[in-house]
Image (cartoon, coloured by chain):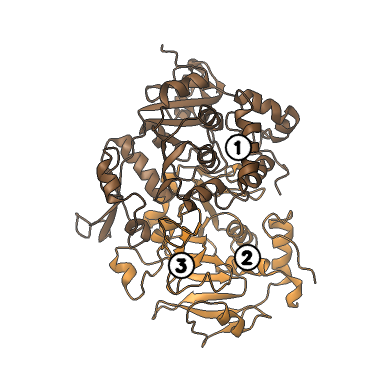
Amino acid sequence: MEDKSLPLGEAIDRYVRDGAHIAVGGFTLNRNPMAAIYEMIRRRIRGLHVYAHSNGTGVDELIGGGCVDRLEIAYAGNGKAAPTCIRFRKAVQEGQIAVEDYSNYMMGLRFLAGAMGVPFLPTLSGLGSDIAEKWGFSAEMRQRDPRLPDDKLITMENPFGAWGDASRVLLVPAVNPDVTLIHVQTADVMGTCRIDGLAFADIEQAKASRHVIVTCEVLAAPETLRGEPERNQIAFPHVSAVCHVPWGGYPTAVFRHYDYDAEFLRNYAAAAADDRRFREYQERWIYGVESHAALLEQVGGKRLAALTADPETGYAAHAKRG
Amino acid sequence: MTAQDYTPREMMTLMAAREIRNGDIVFCGTGISVLAAAAAKKINAPESVIFFETGAVDSRLAELPIAVADPRVMHGAAAHGSLLDAFAFMQNRITGDRVIAILGAAQVDPFGNLNTTCIGDFERPAVRFPGSGGGCDVASFVPRCIAFMQHEKRKFVERLDYLTSPGGLCGGDAREAAGLRPGGVGVVITNKAVLRIDSGSRRLFLEQHYPGVTVREIVENTGFVLDVSRVREALPPTADELRILRQKCDPQRLILGPPASG
């Protein structure tokens, strides 16, 4: 039995190089691999190429941390706190990052194509839209970079004629990240994962990736996970490193463990709107703490206790969110 | 009931709820759209099913979610699918044809196309918005879409800065010619009025103005030519609709915002 458990910092050092192509799991304010995100920022990783669908909190922190050069994304918003993610908006408007726009289904299919080992998959989404027409990455940039497909998307006639009641299809190119980082409720040291609640696109992202770094709330014995294999979504061969990081999704929610911290997200949004305040935020919560455990200590046990999920609903019922 | 007894936001929510029929599967985004779906379920469409792009089907919503990935959409759902499951559910006609979607946008054009991506040039936008999310997918797949808009001239434009989610494209049979299924935005609900796509011209026309809002005010706040020949006054919310919306759907006024001052 291969033991893949590693301290998070070592896992990042080993697998996330400057310029790596990465994907992160979760969705807006849920189950983002935040401990791993903060560790990448703390380590001042640079030049990342990020593949995202709707990864609000984590992707905005990475952009704010100066880690991202290029982004392929469907949606950069973060619920009520930030209808458009603030560092994302600023970076795009100031031309600091290159962005290619897709839809959520297109990004999901791109990960699935990568996981399947096929070059593309078809969809009926986006025909005639500017997502199909306008490219964020130029044709020259695409031709220069062997890691990018020459085309963003391709519209073609249905090769099966009218079969399937469609005249045309849009083809989306596969994605195979160097590293996918996900946060799950339960994993074992070999890397088998169990996600409770909505899985978003984590499974396809993980299966498309050369390496997967898993952080988990609970590190379980392999026999425990194998007792109910039908509840496990990712088997160990996909995974390179497993890091036990309780509250590793904080300040995003982890179903059946804890809720998102609406106050933290609101304070982040307020700080992100101003460069000086944002540097103060980063000093206090990222660079000024040595680990996620230290960040959590700074948040305080009382505040975390108020976010702890209610066993019946899976979230913190009656939490103050306004 | 006078105009002061309810807010434009309450009116918008209830106008959207009235579009939902019993048995519809309602694709919800965040904010006012989930509130409209919750209101319909409690008022006029008890057998409707609330559904999120994150993959939750028939969420119980004991509390209102503030994002489609809020764990509040997970509790008590019939099943949890993936993102891919959620969009496949709408792309396939067996289930997709039963879906009504509620979307928001920064801009809408006369053919019901939506922009949620940017203002200005795409490569170096003056203002960047979040992007499609699932909006483009939903508008491509399902037969009935409602768009929520604040009624401002800069948001109702002859030509979008970026066409994120397809409606009728450039009108006529352009949507079908592009390979899309019939559908896209058929009705736009604003804080002043209801606009609907005309089946002949495929353009938005003014169908209803809210009590206390003049047709002139609506035309002045619309950046494209609007056919007002068929306009009628919308029925104001009933006392029952307002009571259920306020007490059963959003008692904390998380989405409704401040109450009417009158």
The picture's colour for chain A is brown
Question: Residue B20 at x, y = what percent?
Answer: 55, 65
Disc 1 marks which amino acid? Ala
Looking at the image, residue A288 sits to the left or right of residue A241; the answer is: right
Q: Both on one chain, marks 2 and 1? A: no
Read off the residue under disc 1: A253
Q: Tag 3 or tag 2, which sits nearer the N-term?
A: 2
Q: Secondary structure at mark 1?
A: loop
Q: Amino acid at mark 2?
A: Thr
Circles 2, 3 touching at the beta carbon (< 8 Å): no
Task: Give the answer, above or below, for where A70 lies relative to A164.
Answer: above
Q: Is residue A133 visible?
A: yes
User: In x, y percent, where is residue A133?
Assistant: 32, 59
Q: Secondary structure at mark 3?
A: strand
Residue at (48%, 50%) from the top-left corner? B53
Binning the other alpha carbons within 10 Å of mark 3 as few (below 14), some (14 to 19) or many (20 upward) gives many
- Mark 3 residue type: Val
Q: Nearer the viewer, residue A40 or B147?
A: A40
How far across and down, in percent of the image, does residue B222 sit? 53, 77
Determine whether, in the image, residue B31 is placed left or right of residue A175. Answer: right
The residue positioned farthest toward the bottom in the image shown: B229
Image depth: mark 2 or mark 1 in front: 1
Q: Colour of chain B?
A: orange
